[in-house]
Every structure is written in C-alpha cells, then in structure tokens.
Amino acid sequence: MQTSALPDLAHTGTKPMHWLATAAAMAAVVAAAGLLQPDATASASTATHRTAAQHGAAPVAAPDPDRADFHLECAGAGHTVAKEAPGDLDGDGRPETVAVVHCAAGSGTPPSGVYVLTQGSGAAPRIVATLVDPVQKVSVGDFAVRDGVVSATLLGYSSPSVPSCCPDEQEKVTWQWQNGAFVRSSQSEDPAGAGV
C-alpha cells in the first residue's frame, strides 16, 4: 500500500455541525450582499411605496388632475391639463401632483396656471397651492418635479403688442416647500442670448 504524499486532511470528514455552520455563513453573505447592492430601479413610486410600507400603510396614488376642479374661466371652451408630475413636495410620505392647466384654445398661446393638488377626503383631488395664476398671462415651457422641487420655464410678453403665438420673455423658476409655504426662486433669461 502506498501512502499519500499529502498531509492528512482530518477536516474532510463532514458532520452535521459543519454543514450547519456553512449554511449560516452563506446566509450571512447573501443577506449582506442584498443590503449593500444599490437598487437600480428605484423611482418616485418605489420611494412612495417604501415610505408607506415603513408606516404600515398601503401606497397612496398621486392625485389625478383630470378629476380636479380648477375653476378656470374658459368661456365654455373647457380646460386642458397640458403637463403633470407627481412628487412628495412636503415630505409627508404622500405624493402630490403638480399640474399645468390652461383653457382649451383653438389658436394662440393661452395663459397657464400651475397648481399643486393633494388627494382630499372625497373622490376629487383638491388644489392646495396655486404656483402660477392664469391672470399673470404666462405659459409654461419646460416643467419638472424632482426631489421635492418644482421647476418650470415661464414664457411671457414684454408688451401687449407682442403676438400671443410668440412669447418674447422667459424666466426659469423653482418652488420648494419651506416652513409651511412654497418659496419661489427665479433667474431671468434673455431668450435671444443678447444678455451676459
């Protein structure tokens, strides 16, 4: 009989305790990998779901602006929800919806209103803030809601003689919920690029 040149491997004999320790170590590695791995599919809706799950409630859907009453005077033409974006603006874990709304017009650029909606106790969402009132006679270009900040490009007119099709002024603005109110910040821009 030939003896092995390798050392005696006494630990090659398996016992139930060995398998139990191996299984516990593997479970710990898998759990740690799951906690450390970034979630590449995270979005505003999953963030809302996580917040709701932490508080033991079902996720709340953002208010539907098509079901809101905007009280616009459109001379019977009705109104159009031109743009909308959900987001938790006040940090309470419940999403609001910001809606850009204007009267349905056959031509020209009707003035827009920008409204913050919350889901009321009834079926219809309710307006909790008007960020832009249509009486300001501006329309909205770029628009977004990110990380609790509403941003928009407001398009306006330097004088009543400027045709309604062609706004000649623009202003980039943001709104953020601070101390119980939406605080507006703005930066005027020269659309023709003549300014410095």
Image (cartoon, rainbow, N blue to C red):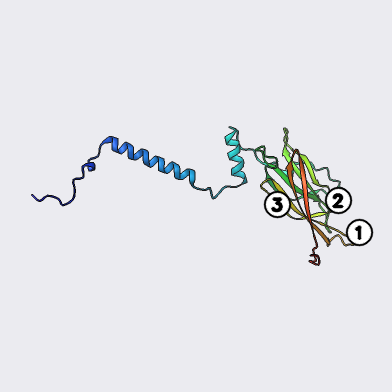
**Which image quadrant: the C terminus?**
bottom right
The residue carrying pointer 1 sits among few (fewer than 14), some (14 to 19) or many (20 or more) residues within 10 Å by Cα, namely few
The residue carrying pointer 2 sits among few (fewer than 14), some (14 to 19) or many (20 or more) residues within 10 Å by Cα, namely few
Instruction: Name the amino acid, label 3.
Output: Ala
User: Which residue is at a point 67% across and 44% down the rendered structure image?
Assistant: 87
Provide residue 1's location: percent of width, then percent of height.
8, 49
Work out how far the residue at label 2 is from the one at label 3, CA to CA, in angstroms: 20 Å
Q: Is residue 18 left or right of residue 139?
A: left
Element under disc 3 = strand
Q: Is residue 88 left or right of residue 28?
A: right
Provide residue 91's location: percent of width, then percent of height.
67, 39
The residue carrying pointer 3 sits among few (fewer than 14), some (14 to 19) or many (20 or more) residues within 10 Å by Cα, namely some
Q: Which numbered circle lies on residue 55?
A: none
Instruction: Name the amino acid, label 1.
Output: Pro
Residue linked to disc 3: 144
In the image, is residue 188 above or below residue 68? below
Residue linked to disc 1: 160
Work out how far the residue at label 3 is from the one at label 1, CA to CA, in angstroms: 29 Å
Residue linked to disc 2: 136
Sequence-wise, the earlier of marks 2 and 3 is 2
